Amino acid sequence: MTASPPDDGKPAVARAAMPVLLAITVISWVGFGMVAPLLPFYGALFDVPAWEVTLLFSAHSAGQFAGELYWGRLSDRIGRRPVLLMTITGMGLCFLGLAFAPNIWLAVLVRMVGGFFAGNISTVQSYVVDISPPERVSSRLGQLGAANVVGFSSGPALGGLLANPEIGAAGFRPPLLTGACLSFIAVICVFLLVRESFRHSPATAKKRGPFDGLVESMRHPMLRSLMGVGILFSICFIAAWATLGLWGAPRHGWDARTLGIIMGVGGLTGAFCQAVLVGPLVRRLGAGRTIILGLAMMTVFLIAMAFAPWTWLAAAFLCLAIAGNALVIPATATFVITVSTPERQGQNLGASNASMALARVGGPMIGGMLFAAAPVAPFIAAALGMLPAIWLTRRAMREGVDRNPR
């Protein structure tokens, strides 16, 4: 299978492709977050304990770990466009499967397969780098990061606002069917508007296993440190995120609708930070210091949220913690690009994103266990876990050159 050469007119290609790429990113993360406000109701519907319900988070992330390794490297070999078409179609089918899952274990299986197809973020990032002039890369990755946060937080909002748990299983279907429709619309848009961006060479056509690419990426000292950062900050943040509904219901009286709205506002805050602030911050501070700023914000505001006495204050601190998270992801991608050749770009971004997905496998279960010990424990542990991530970021800055890339 051979891709067409990229169009020489990058601005024209970018104008057509960027809105579609942003939509793909939103849809990928909507699928992850959609079940967040529904977890207590899934437990009641299927009559299962909390640890089994949190597997819905972990299964998606396990699939996404494999997907990021596979699709990112495959896009280096056959091109970005066919990978995008395959993965978005798969996501749509998995939304449908989850809507009609008859039991928790089949729902977990569907979530895992859906996560595999949603592991296309490195392919989207690679496409953006392919079509962007050097001075626009960090700002456009920031736009993708904004779409990431919008999807991450609008998923819970969509799940909370469209679901009607009072009528049983049928009440969970409207948000999932909406996700399926959005995926199939995105497939049509990619087919019509997105041209191939990647020019092949004999080096990129070589077929190798995805784990070969992971091992190769880990041999680079700076990439290895950045993958450690991804694992730490992701496992900590997701442990807190997965238990937010369980904590907010008894402490502040948050129901699914309220939690969905709060997460949605947090998503808008994070989207603003990534769309408007990431590019200027990376150019001014460098990618490494931008990562450290985001990690420090999460440390401070997760602890503040855990002990906030009023609902509005807890919601405000949550939004600021999401803003910190919003700075870390695109700055990490920008940092990875500084040491990536074009034929290894998808591989290295895939390895970085896979490390974050791997952390999200265990994060919800760890959060559940910490919550069982003490309701505030997931948030305190998450905040403290950012400190070694800051140390690893500083080490990556020493091992590489934290320049203002592209």
Image (cartoon, rainbow, N blue to C red):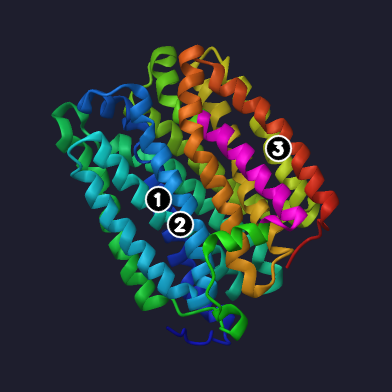
Q: Is residue 63 left or right of residue 284?
A: left
Q: Quadrant of residue 308?
A: top right
Q: Which residues are magenta?
A: 218-239
Total residue callouts: 3
Residue 173 makes an appearance in the image: yes
Q: On the rendered image, what quadrant is the C terminus found in? A: bottom right
Q: Main secondary structure of the magenta part?
A: helix
Q: Are marks 2 and 1 in contact (CB under 8 Å)?
A: yes
Q: Position of residue 288 (x, y in %)?
A: 76, 49
Q: CA distance from mark 1 to mark 3?
A: 25 Å
Q: Quadrant of residue 10?
A: bottom right
**Which numbered circle lies on residue 115?**
1
Q: Are marks 1 and 3 in contact (CB under 8 Å)?
A: no
Residue density around tag 1, few if under 14, some if 14–19, many if 20 or more, within 10 Å: many
Residue at point 22% right, 37% down? 172
384 to 138, vertically: above or below: above
Q: CA distance from mark 2 to mark 1?
A: 7 Å
Residue annotated with mark 2: 67
Q: Position of residue 134 (x, y in %)?
A: 70, 71
Q: Secondary structure at mark 2?
A: helix
Residue annotated with mark 3: 389
